[in-house]
Amino acid sequence: MTSTAAARPPGRPRAGVNDVVFAATLSTVRELGYARATVERIAVAAGVAKSTVYRRWPSKGALIVDCLLDAFGPAPLEGADRAEAMTSAIRWIAAKIGEPGVGDAFAGVFSDAVSDPALREILSARFQDPYRIAFQNALGEPENRVLFFIDVVVGTLLHRMGMTGEPMVEADVTALIEMIVPLVTPDSAAGTA
Amino acid sequence: MTSTAAARPPGRPRAGVNDVVFAATLSTVRELGYARATVERIAVAAGVAKSTVYRRWPSKGALIVDCLLDAFGPAPLEGADRAEAMTSAIRWIAAKIGEPGVGDAFAGVFSDAVSDPALREILSARFQDPYRIAFQNALGEPENRVLFFIDVVVGTLLHRMGMTGEPMVEADVTALIEMIVPLVTPDSAAGTA
DNA sequence: CAGGTAGCGATACCTCGGGTATCGAAACCT
DNA sequence: AGGTTTCGATACCCGAGGTATCGCTACCTG
């Protein structure tokens, strides 16, 4: 039964270089901004050939999306109740977007996706959907409601980032939380209704 | 006193072609999307040379910003009270962003601005600031509060537009209004406090 | 009418960045 | 040893923003 799952494919195995590329991506974006962080420069910063990058990711956007997935990791959904889970999730996203490079990369790939349906599909399916589903389960809210919350939270944070170049300050993140948290269905209503 | 203000400068006067270019810009963006709406194509659609466009606007971004200013016009701030003014303003922005071409152009220029500080400055100074000041006066809210409202409203609408390619549906715009309007200072508190 | 100035269309051009293609050299398996 | 795939290097294509040149045209002033 050696052929079950991971019967190593023939040929030279890939070098375990993804993490290095992710790190190089974020640091390059941090130093030069999204537009000037070319794939060429990222590859050089990672000590890798440009062709190697394009062998792993079909486009710059796909690379950035995977890089963001790596940077964000799983959403923290622990909390005594739903209001607390929502609060911690918003603070988590705000903090991630505030990390140097991450916010720029996020805003940049989002921007590219506006004019690129293929990238939009990648961003939606690989990045947004997993978090959306996790939030639906954690909050017990319907899909369209969670999508609305995502639009508000991520849209607000990215707009601030895009217009000022700086992440949203603590006080405004708190205002954002105070605006949204009252909208989640309280735990008591979930079981009874 | 013929030299007071508008002593016409020497040389051939400019042809009154701005409106044609604005219309061509929106229709080209509507048909091809932001990225493929090149300055070349816009110029051809307007029946104008590319060099003429660049003589009037220093960059594609600046052209789009002026085009959006023309498309948006002054903000409607009439309303019996502040809550009503806020409501009508949000519906107005949502409707404008929903117009074919306008939303794409807005999202596109915003995206470009993320990686282009010069364009960000143009967008902030020429587009956002006038509306921000008008809202400050109409709502009697401090600058940072109005900036927060703009982040939430515009950010949410653009995020929806960017992720789905479609403007936000009526029901969600209403949800957005119901979320924000309670946050504006009521008229009664403004004079008494 | 002559001369100066500046917008206009046309066109050629530069630059940069995403993405592709090719090649010889490795690395791994059977 | 032979097959298969990756790797780095490099050259290349293409589209788009932006610049520059040039002959022409419209307008004003003297």
Image (cartoon, coloured by chain):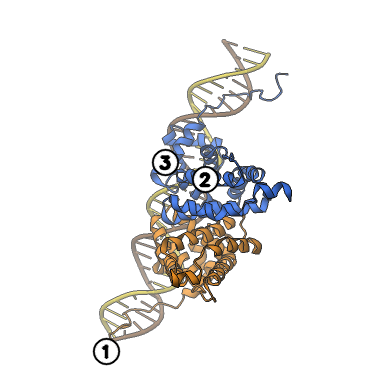
Chain colours: A orange, B blue, C brown, D yellow
On the same chain: label 3 and label 2?
A: yes
Closest to the observer, C10 or A147: A147
Identify the residue at image location x=36%, y=79%: A12
Binning the other alpha carbons within 10 Å of mark 1 as few (below 14), some (14 to 19) or many (20 upward) gives few
Q: Residue furthest bottom?
A: A1
| Callout in the foreground (1, 2) | 2
Please tell me which residue is depicted at 59% across the width and 52% down the height of the picture: B149
SS under mark 3: helix
Question: For mark 2, what is the residue?
Answer: B93
Residue B71, label in figure: none
User: Mark 3 = which residue?
Assistant: B28
* First in residue order: circle 3 vs circle 2: 3
Q: Nearer the viewer, residue A95 or B18?
A: A95
| Image quadrant in which the N terminus of chain B is located | top right
Secondary structure beneath disc 1?
loop
Report whether mark 3 lies on the same chain as mark 1: no
Same chain shared by disc 1 and disc 2 = no
Protein chain holding label 2: B
Is residue A31 rendered to the left or right of residue A19? Answer: right
Spatial CA distance of label 1 from label 2 is 62 Å
Comparing labels 3 and 2, the label whose residue is closer to the camera: 2
**Does residue B116 appear in this view?**
no
Other residues around mark 3 within 10 Å, as few (<14) / some (14–19) / many (≥20): many
- Amino acid carrying label 2: it is Ile
The residue that label 1 is drawn on is A1
Number of disc labels: 3
Which kind of residue does numbered mark 1 sit on?
Answer: Met
Which chain letter matches label 3? B
Specify the amino acid type for callout 3: Thr
